[in-house]
Image: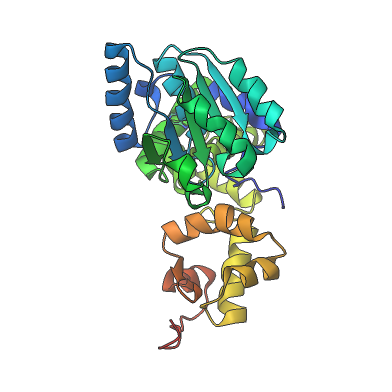
Amino acid sequence: MTKRIIAGSIAEEEAPYELSLRPRVLAEYIGQQSVKDNLDVAIQASLKRGEPLDHILLYGPPGLGKTTLASVIANEMSAHFRSTAGPLIQLKGDLTAILTNLEFGDVLFIDEIHRLQPNIEEILYPAMEDFKLDIGATTRAGLITAPLRSRFGMVHRLDFYSVPELEYIIRRSAEILTAPITGEGCHEIAKRCRGTPRVANRLLKRIRDFADVKGTGEITAPVARDALKLLDIDEQGFDDMDRKLLRAVIERFGGGPVGLNTIAAVLSEEIDAVEDIYEPYLLQIGFLQRTPRGRVATKFAYEHLGIPYRPPQAGLF
Ligand code: ADE
């Protein structure tokens, strides 16, 4: 898969930097209000009773803060936070080793939990009855097996963030990085980070470099716009890949409906990547629609690409 500056997934070299920007307690965690409210009640109740929290499953597109929220929960519970990921657990022994090292009340975070092999997943079941808190995270709630899903007492979906929420996050990150930024500068980045804090923080870092080299160091709206232009990110926060996807649906398939497999083949990408990474934001902002017959480009997509709109033929979906 091509490396994108607007990818929701985390790049290895970003981990330490991202860690420093991460909120540590619920009060610092911006957005996802209803998830936070529910977790707050559950955490307070379990602390009051001196009982461990119920297991939690967090799902949603990459970059929205599943890992961050899990570490906040561990902090709030004053528990040890241990973290692993489905693809890292190849052998039964890998998971057994992790589980035997857990203590009462510890939090085990399993990212991409849908990628645990079924025979390994079974080892998790008895451990989940053992008063250790498991937090599973996945971009694909639909791929979690029913027995695993039924063991999570709380299931929460993380949504894309609003522009004002992202402005807060960007302002907070800029303060941590001691990067001067104006309100308009924050707004410009917030509008173009695909509703995703990880993308916002990554863009902030690139724009800060640009401001230091080409300007006075202050991140203003014009500086942000120039930097984003250099990064080939348009007003919607789309990169070349998004535009290619929309253009393919419109120009090669008459605006759709076109199947996911076909889109993936045209873009030389994996089906999972299109479904988990490229598509969710385009669906969320209504540039793409999912129908039983496949994906359809909407009027917004045509307008954005400057192509005259032709509605899909009636009766096709
Ligand atoms: N950094 C990344 N995600 C965040 C969030 N939800 N709140 C505060 N800071 C963040």
What residue do we see at 31% from left, 35% from top?
Answer: 33
Query: Could you tell me which residue is drawn at 62 percent across and 28 percent down?
Result: 84
Instruction: Give above or below for 21 relative to 275.
Output: above
Observer-nearest of 38 and 307 = 38
Residue 259 location, quadrant: bottom right
Residue 34 on image: x %, y %: 29, 37
Residue 181: tell me if it is visible: no
Identify whether 218 is placed above or below 249.
Answer: above
Q: Would you place residue 107 above or below residue 165 in this image?
A: above
Q: Quadrant of ligand 1?
A: top left
Is 84 on the left or on the right of 2, as rendered? left
Q: Residue at x 62, y 73 (%)?
A: 248
**Residue 196 falls left or right of residue 231:** left
Rendered-image quadrant of the C terminus: bottom left
Q: What residue is at 54 percent from the left and 37 percent from the top?
A: 198
Q: In front here: 285 or 274?
A: 274
Whole-percent x, y for residue 209 in the image: 64, 33
Q: Position of residue 239 (x, y in %)?
A: 61, 56
Image position of 37 with respect to 270: above or below:
above
- The answer to which quarter of the image holds residue 155 is top left
Where does residue 58 sit, x and y in percent of width and height?
Answer: 45, 38
What count of labels does the image hold?
0
Residue 28 seen in the current view: yes
In screen coordinates, is 70 left or right of 35? right
